[in-house]
Image (cartoon, rainbow, N blue to C red):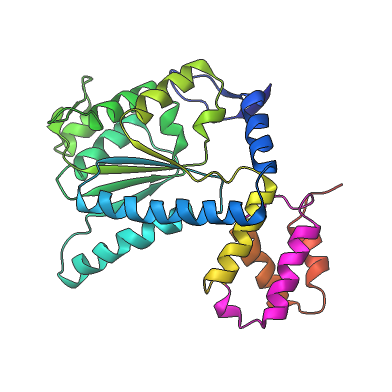
Amino acid sequence: MAKANTKPSAGTSQIIEFDPDAIRKTELKVAQETDEQIMTRMAEHFQILEEMTKAVRSGDIRAMIVSGPPGVGKSFGVEKVLEVGGLMDTLADRKQRYEVVKGSLSAIGLYAKLHEFSEKGNVLVFDDADNIFYDTTCLNLLKAALDTSQRRFISWNTDSRLLRSEGIPDRFEFKAAVIFISNLKFAHIRSKALKDHLTALESRCHYIDLEIDTTREKLLRIKQVINDTDMLGKYDFPASVQTELVKFIDTNKDKFREISLRTVLKLSDLRKTFPKMWQMMARTTLMKKG
């Protein structure tokens, strides 16, 4: 039984249990695909992510969950779309209608943030804020915010001096949209309590699993982004150096602490700064010991 430690939070277990059978099933499925099939699938999923984010921004979709491992470009894909609308707000000297909330968030902090962005046309993005999935109070707030009824009301039923001081009512209507960007793959979760909560959220949202689960898929995603975007443009590397970087990651894939686009950028920094000893620097700073 695979386990991962999580930050303790009220009303939930401190341990997430993952289903090894579900993980193995995913690995077997990927093993049957060609590289071309995997890259086509990933390109389609990121195109869907962009179109769905546009629909959230326009108010046609009220909630979306994006699931994928760290450093594959899921946050960039969402923020790129939202920034287009944000630019128009900036030019018109209007308050931004979206906000990206990163990291840990308490239940009362979540309630206040939902109130701040409760009006129609606003979008709240919770990025790498998976702790809210483990807190019963947070989950109940989110269920209310994402309810499928025509009008959605959120209530805070405990007296709070903080809310009073900020002029936040104990009940309000939520008309905005929400996007969750999560590192959790819902289908792999085995912990029953957490799985039940995630299922309740999933039933209220459009769920996009980017399906980048294995090292092979992550390496192909790296190649795809390098080939199709200007990700490494600022380094002014010739094509031969870009190929060299990808080959180095592929050769040492079992040694890196993380296989991601962030790893590519870190490695590129080393290649640019230490052209004669970048590989030695990478082994010291980016790879697992022993």
For the record, the magenta segment spans 232-260
The residue that appears at 16% across and 68% down in the rendered structure is 93
Is residue 174 shown left or right of residue 272? Answer: left
Is residue 89 shown left or right of residue 282? Answer: left
The residue that appears at 69% across and 66% down in the rendered structure is 267
Q: Position of residue 29 (x, y in %)?
A: 64, 37
Q: Position of residue 30 (x, y in %)?
A: 65, 42
Q: Quadrant of residue 178?
A: top left
Residue 108 vertical position relative to residue 119 in the rendered view, above or below: above
Q: Quadrant of residue 2?
A: top right
Is residue 258 among what the camera can see?
no
Q: Position of residue 104 (x, y in %)?
A: 44, 39
The residue that appears at 64% across and 50% down in the rendered structure is 217
Q: Position of residue 176 (x, y in %)?
A: 20, 43
Is residue 200 among what the camera can see?
yes
- Residue closer to the observer: 43 or 253: 43
Residue 37 is a magenta residue: no
Residue 256 vertical position relative to residue 146 in the rendered view, above or below: below
Quadrant position of the N terminus in the picture: top right
